[in-house]
Image (cartoon, rainbow, N blue to C red):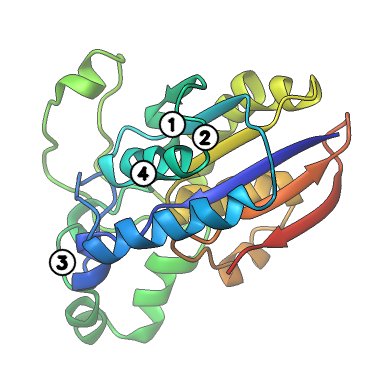
Amino acid sequence: MSKLVLMRHGESVANYNHTFTGWSDVSLTEEGKNEAHEAGRKLKKTNIKFDDAHTSYLKRAITSENIVLDELNQLWIPQHKTWRLNERHYGALRGRNKKVVRAEVGDEQFMRWRRSFQSVPPKLKTVPDLRRYHDAGVEEPRAESLKMAYERLVPYWVDEIAPKLMDGKNQLVVAHGSSLRALIKYIENIDDMGIDGVEVGNAQPIIYTLDENLRILDKQIMN
């Protein structure tokens, strides 16, 4: 058996301001840091010893992962960063207040952009050429549906996380609301419509116990 823990970062500045974020690199609020510390303290009580930790290229997730590992006295374990765990890209919505967008487009369109598997938000006209993605050979997308985020995330699961779990090694993944929804869809085999109702709260670790074939034996949400 192995343990897989998924955790969304603590509250970010964008969460606090109710703005779309995506690949924008925003910091945690002080409350978000406190949430990550509390999540680490809760996980410490489980006595899970992690072999690896995985996170995105975005500092709200990186900082949250470091705080959790520090609380666990496990900062020494290998930490793997990948753009594939980045939040879903919200395109031209990023930086915009969610309430304002909702008032402009109506509830139906707003929820389609926010929750559906297939819907792609309005695209950015241009994207920045950042070193973090240039060095990885990746061009920042102009917008993504959850399906597109799912398709770039699953290969990382298959190649980098699943083999370690099958080898009995416990894995920690600290990422984002939508990227974790995509991963949960894959792990739990949730259909395209069912994923609309899945929520992932800030700094609430989800603990899976898996057998050697990655079948789920148990799932706990620490909220």
Q: Which mark is residue 84?
A: 1
Q: Where 83 sits versus 3, above or below?
A: above
Residue designated by label 3: 96
Tell me the amino acid under the disc marked 3.
Arg
Tell me the amino acid under the disc marked 4.
Ala
Residue at screen point 71% across, 45% down: 187
Disc nearer the start of the sequence (4/3) = 4
Q: Secondary structure at mark 2?
A: helix
Separation of residues labelled 2 and 4 (CA atoms): 16 Å
| Mark 1 Cα shell of 10 Å, populated few (<14), some (14-19), many (≥20) | many
Separation of residues labelled 4 and 1 (CA atoms): 13 Å
Q: Secondary structure at mark 3?
A: loop
Residue designated by label 2: 153
Disc nearer the start of the sequence (4/1) = 4
18 lies left or right of 65 = left
Tell me the amino acid under the disc marked 2.
Leu
Residue at screen point 11% across, 39% down: 126
| Mark 2 Cα shell of 10 Å, populated few (<14), some (14-19), many (≥20) | many
Tell me the amino acid under the disc marked 1.
Arg
Q: Nearer the viewer, mark 4 or mark 1?
A: 4
Disc nearer the start of the sequence (1/2) = 1
163 lies left or right of 1 = left
- Residue 15, by quadrant, is bottom left
Residue designated by label 4: 61
